[in-house]
Image (cartoon, grey):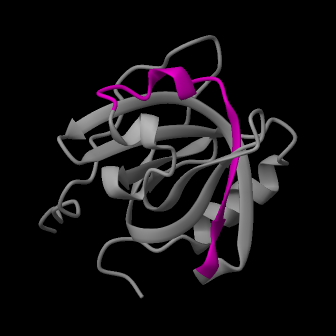
Amino acid sequence: MPQQKAPKGAAKKASTSTGNTDRALREDLEPLPSRSLTSIDHMTLLARQGWLVEASTTGFLLEVERKHLAPKVFRDSLSLKELEGDRVYLTIDAMNLEIGGTITRTHRLSKDRWQIAIDLRDDAPEYWRECLMEFLPRPGGF
């Protein structure tokens, strides 16, 4: 069966793990809109909207365009590294779901696009994580 192309701008999978935690292999998603990425630590709206492009049972990868970053300091910055370690939550309207985690990594893809890797909260049960993965849309699926 021919391999499907990842959505334009989608990230490549991490080949190594960082830190001491085990990481599940991320799967490509049909870009799924999210909104209101908010820092719990600073009670600040970080991004008005973004797109989940990859996910696993341990976390997900969010892509955000510069124009959707809420604080002007981040729109003008070349790095979002200072967000790493922040506890955050966001809303996925298509699933009527608010989900939280910790920003583990940020990466600038282009002049106007960022990737933000978020690990799910530690108190999220494994069965819930597995169910979430089953419901996320895959490329070419419904």
Q: Is residue 116 left or right of residue 125?
A: left
User: At which x and y percent is residue 43?
Assistant: 76, 43
Q: Which quadrant holds the C terminus? A: bottom left
Q: Residue furthest bottom?
A: 142
**Residue 71 higher or lower than 37, as above or below:** above
Above or below for 97 versus 85: below
102 or 49, nearer to the observer:
49
Q: Name the spot of residue 24 as percent of width and height, x first.
A: 55, 37
Say if the magenta span includes residue 78. Answer: yes
- The magenta span reads 77-93
The residue shown at (66%, 50%) is: 38
Count every numbered label the image shows and give the total.
0
Residue found at x 23% / y 39%: 109
Residue at 18% across / 65% down in the picture? 4
Q: Residue at x 61, y 24 (%)?
A: 22
Expressed as whole percent of the image width and height from the top left, the position of residue 101 reads 70, 41
Residue 140 placement, left or right of 9: right
| Residue occupying the far left of the picture | 2
Q: Position of residue 81 (x, y in %)?
A: 46, 22
Residue farthest top in this picture: 20
In depth, the one of 29 and 70 nearer the eye is 70
Q: Quadrant of residue 31?
A: bottom left
The answer to if 62 sits in the magenta stretch is: no
Q: Quadrant of the N terminus?
A: bottom left
In this rendering, the answer to whether 112 lies above or below 68 is above
